[in-house]
Image: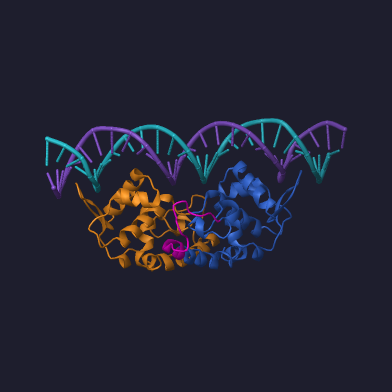
Chain colours: A orange, B blue, C cyan, D purple
Amino acid sequence: MLSKKTKYAFHALTYLGKHRDQKTVLIQDIAAEYGISHKFLENILLELKKAGVLGSKKGKGGGYYLIKDPKDVALSKVIRLLDGPIALLPCVSLNYYEPCAECKSEVACGLNKVMIQVRDEMLNVLENKSLADILDKE
Amino acid sequence: MLSKKTKYAFHALTYLGKHRDQKTVLIQDIAAEYGISHKFLENILLELKKAGVLGSKKGKGGGYYLIKDPKDVALSKVIRLLDGPIALLPCVSLNYYEPCAECKSEVACGLNKVMIQVRDEMLNVLENKSLADILDKE
DNA sequence: ATAAACTCTATAAAAAAAGTAGGGTTTATG
DNA sequence: CATAAACCCTACTTTTTTTATAGAGTTTAT
């Protein structure tokens, strides 16, 4: 399951996507809309900013805004940023690979093979769907 | 990511599948093969037994054995048993459904829609692949 | 100058995962 | 029938991860 962090990130991005007409959106507006803790959301938006997905404006009248076109924000990117690996096993992760401690030979591991298939099916959706696809359906 | 519990369950099932010629297999043999704590594995095997995947024989000379044909042990079943939901969000889980606290309308939720697609792609593999497919590749 | 708003780091609390302990029950065998 | 082997069951502890909070700092409009 996705962490709340990731889920909240998607909600926040959706909110920002819906309000692209205004220059900036306040953290507290997003937090209020979804009943999320202001401070918790703050950390999430900051991560999205550092990753180049959001921009911000400091000071009075400031706030956050989408810096990218929604179609260029792949769902996989958001998940990896907040949650880490998408794959179900470390040994099949493309971005967070680690060998399984108990595994003698990855090449001869049947579990490894099937989990590669699962990963690829997941990525087939998550890499090709974007924030724009979420916005389309709201 | 899958929990260690689930990963160990798959390893144990694989081991049992490979040793179907012998009547029973000892917990300690599986634990030694993969470097897993005996007691931790014990709990896992017990859950698999209660779920009807494994059988056991008590007393001296006892042990565990596969009670089903490997092709009838869907990967999804093992994951749901030990890890719970396969879906990435509670609101799209078929077996462990829960509404998202912050979500006003599931029908109007774009995230919900896309996560249903991810779930279905995952299940397309996990429901149709079985222990037999893992064994085939070892 | 002041208040609004994001920035940053650290810490605390809660929940989940991983692992441990130990006595109970069953059974083969000498 | 005594004994040792092996699974059965429940509870507990430890560790890790997730979730949430706190508070001081920086920037900017007015």
Residue B57 visible from this viewpoint: yes
Residue B58: percent from the left, percent from the top? Answer: 75, 45
Q: Is residue B107 magenta?
A: yes
Side of A135 where B45 appears, left or right: right
- Work out whether residue A2 or residue B99 is closer to the camera in this orientation and state it: B99
Identify the magenta region.
B97-114
* Quadrant of the snapshot with the C terminus of chain B: bottom right
The residue lying toward the viewer, choosing from B89 and A116, is: B89
Location of residue A70 (image quadrant):
bottom left
Image: B42 above or below B74: above
Q: Examine the structure image and report whether residue B51 is included in the region drawn in magenta.
A: no
Please provide percent x and percent y for residue A58: 20, 48
| Majority SS type along the magenta span | loop
On screen, residue B25 versus residue B128, left or right, reads: right
User: Up-down: is B128 above or below B48?
Assistant: below
Going 30% across and 54% down the picture, which residue do you hit? A48
Tell me what residue is drawn at x 39 percent, y 57 percent. A79
Residue B32 in percent (x, y) is at: 60, 46
> How far across and how far down the image is residue A71, in percent?
32, 67
Q: Does A90 sit left or right of C9 as displayed?
A: right
B50 sits left or right of A107 in the view: right
